[in-house]
Amino acid sequence: MITTSSKTKSTSVRRRLPFFSEIIRNKTFYAMMLPGLLFIIIIYYLPMFGVVIAFQEYNPFKGILGSPWIGFKNFEFLFKSDALFQITFNTIFYNIIFIILGIGLAMITAILIDGISNRFLAGAYKSILLLPYLLSWIVAEYLLYSFLSVDKGILNHLLQGWFGIDPIQWYSEPIYWRFILPAAYVWKNVGYFAVIFAAGISGISTDYYEAAKMDGASRFQQAFRITIPMLAPITITLVLLQAGKIFYAAFGDWGMFYNLPRESGVLFSATNVIDTYVYRALKQMSDFGMSTAVGFYQSCVGFVLVLVSNYFIRLYDRDSALF
């Protein structure tokens, strides 16, 4: 009995080890985690306290503690705006297109690259595809302008020289930008997503493909029956992460909507989204409370969208859900 009780006590003591003892025992792992943890806390969590500015008439000289509270008046700027429907529609429309095209084309690209037997060429293709992702939208703006300029643009010269078509005023016709912006997003981001999918494909066991070859499956059948289903967890994770940012300008690519149209007011009906609208208003009024209110609204809607998306994914595959 004494032996049994002593064993029970020692087991309970081990289970109740203080947290700092756990850190000491695994100090190497916690030290490796510390830089990333500090980065997340400083960059992502500390600024969250600034959300109170959304409910204040913020004055930089008085600070958060000294600025008066005004309730929900800062939110009235967005919800009473005549452009609310237009900028909300543009934001949702483009981001849905970006999710479908970005993830879909990236998966196809990764599968095609995986089919290249020469590893050097496969690596070269990945590097070429990833290069646009490393460029800023400022650089992309000048590249696009070299193609779409009315008098000096490459595209207008080709259309005029080959087909006899008069130069097109690309920066004066909103309808074209419904296609230009998605094309620009795909050009810049597909390579990044393709590298993620390529990493997932490299983790698939070759036994599946060898068994499929023995059964006479073609490369097309292997892709649909093996590769795409095995990439489902990565695809679901990317969709969930992008769904949370659906109320933001191209998932953080604010420069695409602001820089590529070159501030052409004629194009606002097709290029103006919530982020660019708030930025232009902030430049005119310098109202920090208003911009914070819109950012808080976007964050809340994004959080709800993640919960809803995760709920439907749990219905489809419980193991693939985030929580």
Image (cartoon, rainbow, N blue to C red):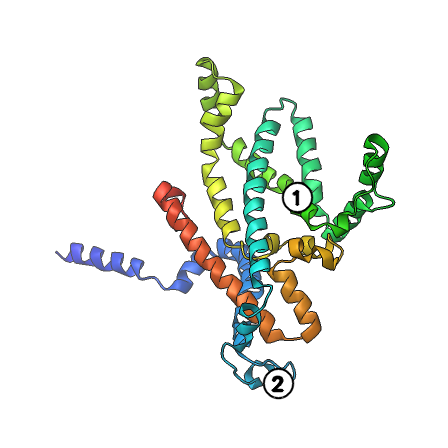
- Crowding at mark 2 (Cα within 10 Å: few <14, some 14-19, many 20+): few
Placement of the N terminus among the 4 image quadrants: bottom left
Name the quadrant containing residue 143.
top right
Q: Earlier in the sequence, mark 2 or mark 1?
A: 2
- Under mark 2, the amino acid is Lys
Q: Position of residue 125 (x, y in %)?
A: 68, 32
Q: Is residue 184 above or below residue 272?
A: above
Residue on which the image places disc 2: 62
Q: Measuring 53% from the left and 53% from the top, which residue is drawn there?
A: 246
- Crowding at mark 1 (Cα within 10 Å: few <14, some 14-19, many 20+): few
Residue on which the image places disc 1: 179
Q: Position of residue 284 (x, y in %)?
A: 70, 72
Question: Viewer-nearest of labels 2 and 1?
Answer: 1
- Under mark 1, the amino acid is Phe
Tag count: 2
Q: Is residue 46 visible?
A: no
Q: Measuring 65% from the left and 29% from the top, which residue is drawn there?
A: 122
Q: Is residue 170 rendered to the left or right of residue 231?
A: right
Q: Is residue 65 above or below residue 293?
A: below
Q: Is residue 52 rendered to the left or right of residue 310?
A: right
Pick the front one: 114 or 9: 114
